[in-house]
Amino acid sequence: MRPRHIESLVDDFGQIVSEVSIDNISPTFAPLVDAACESIPETVGDELSSLYLYGSIPAARAVAGRSDLDLLAVLQSEPGRRCRRRIEGVERELEARFPKRVREVSIAVTWIDEVFHGDRSLGWKVFIRHLCVLLWGDDIAAELPKYRPTPEVCANLNGDAPRVLADFWRQFEVADSEEEHRRIGGMIARKILRTGMSVVSAQSGEWATSRADIASYLILYFPEIASDIELLLHLAEEQELALVGNVARLRALSQWAVRQAERELVPHLQDTGL
């Protein structure tokens, strides 16, 4: 059941409709995206196969100073430590060149064999096909079909929630500043929202990517946590006061997401054999 005010992101055949587009990049973020298209291929060199943009900027939801520049570098082969350090250097360089334009520059890394033959191959394929737009290089998405939000697809996207959330909480425990706690708290909240939406998608065949639409679905399917959804949205935006007095509540919501993932997603992840 879809809330009436939400536009479906599946077509008449039940396939995911991509809402990201190169045309959605606003003039505010275009210079930063252009700089990334220059710096990353130059820094990575022949090891780079493709460069993609994902997240709020190609979905036309980005807000200057509050949104991230989210990039995916697909390499020819698994990168070594030296290559990863160079990519991390590009992140910091772009942040320094465009202060206050985005909250953070993040370059995720994968490689051809991992996309097509790795343990999470299906998740990478869906992610690239429906959530990314090509900026540079060979377009893997052109080789891929449209996907439906099946339990197997949803599991491959967020069935890692138990591991990822545990890792985030370890980072949270050793963080030594309020700013760092708020940043990691935002990562935790966003993963909870995505995991909840994957559970909903696996059950209903519906699909949503904006946090507002995800919240509407979660309230519909999990009315018992309706009062927590607004908090998750504030935390996801890393609002300054949202975390104050709410760490235990966030931890409880994280445990809820882990239970949902273990019950509804992880079994399908195992069933895929991927």
Image (cartoon, rainbow, N blue to C red):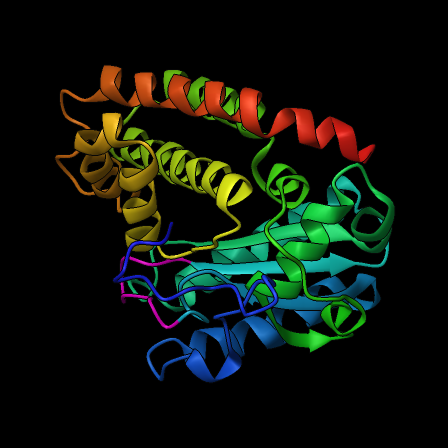
Q: Is residue 105 left or right of residue 15?
A: left
Q: Position of residue 174 (x, y in %)?
A: 40, 17
The residues colored magenta run: 60-68
Q: Position of residue 40 (x, y in %)?
A: 64, 67
Q: Image point 52% across, 23% down: which residue?
A: 167
Q: Quadrant of residue 80?
A: top right
Q: What residue is at 40 percent from the left and 37 percent from the top?
A: 187
Residue at point 77%, 64% (across, down): 48
- Looking at the rendered image, the quarter that the C terminus falls into is top right
Residue 153: % across, % down: 65, 45
- Residue 67 painted magenta: yes
- Residue at the spot x=33%, y=67% of the render? 61
Q: Position of residue 147 (x, y in %)?
A: 67, 59
Which of 102 and 156 lies nearest the eye of the viewer?
156
- Is residue 242 shown left or right of residue 189? left
- On screen, residue 107 above or below 53: above
Q: In the rendered view, tell whether residue 41 sits above or below residue 264.
A: below
Could you tell whether 127 is left or right of 197 in the image? right
- Helix, strand or loop for the magenta stretch, by majority: loop
